[in-house]
Amino acid sequence: MNILIVDDDATCRTVLGTTLKKLGHEVTVATGGAEAWAIFEKSHVPLLISDMVMPDVHGLELCKRIRAANRPKYTYIIMLTSVGGKSGFLVGMRAGADDFMNKPFDEDQLAARLVVAERILNLQSQVNQLSGLLPICCVCKKVRDDKNYWHQVESYISKHTDAQFSHGYCPDCYTKTKQEIDRVKNSLRSQEPSDENTNRRG
């Protein structure tokens, strides 16, 4: 996952960046909130880990700007802070943060939080795809997922939602099906020997 880290402390940036790379993530580094905002304006940022207290644009302001941008793709935000107490947590949540970690961070806790973040981002992506434009074959009506696999409509929706299906006929299909059944019945009747022909053979 591509992660943007923002901190005015060079040591913290280095340690965090090294840890994230060791966990298998790609890392972009910003030295302050203004630089991070410029990066966000140019491209999608799936996950942001930001210090809360910075000299130019602090973490809470950066968080508010990102939420106000209301991008179609969600940015998951983890705030790093040395500020303890309930009030700081509540202020951060109101600004739009998704999670918090105390400085100095614990590597195992960070790894666990990233798993949760990735899970939520995947769910968000699925919701966006369902509520947006679905690529569907004009012949067989299969739906293409984000991994370029094609699925029957029912299996795709069942996989991505809690929806269940009951099958029936719409009025148009019912009429066409009934007409086809009647046509076959009439055809079979016309092929049956009449009583007169049967008597003659007797």
Image (cartoon, helix red, strand yellow):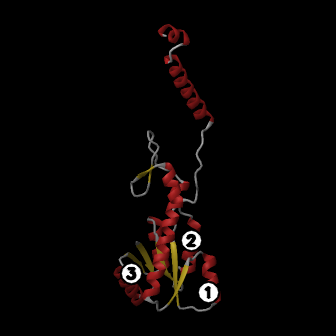
**Residue kind at label 2, given as amino acid type:** Arg
Q: Is residue 18 left or right of residue 120?
A: left
The number of discs equals: 3
* Observer-nearest of 157 and 120: 157
Residue at (54% x, 75% y) in the render = 62
Q: Are marks 1 and 2 in contact (CB under 8 Å)?
A: no
Residue at (63% x, 82% y) in the render = 91
SS for tag 3?
A: helix
First in sequence: mark 3 vs mark 2: 3
Q: Which residue is mark 3?
A: 20
First in sequence: mark 3 vs mark 1: 3
Q: CA distance from mark 3 to mark 1?
A: 25 Å
**Residue kind at label 3, given as amino acid type:** Leu
Q: CA distance from mark 3 to mark 2?
A: 25 Å
Q: Which residue is mark 2?
A: 65
* Observer-nearest of 162 and 89: 162
Q: Residues within 10 Å of mark 3 (few under 14, many from 20)?
A: many
Residue 78 in the image, given as x and y percentages of width and height: 51, 79
Rendering quarter of residue 172: top right
Residue 61's place in the image compared with 200, above or below, is below
Residue 96 in the image, given as x and y percentages of width and height: 59, 74
Residue at (52% x, 76% y) in the render = 77
Residue at (50% x, 10% y) in the render = 197
Q: Which residue is mark 1?
A: 88
Q: CA distance from mark 1 to mark 2?
A: 18 Å
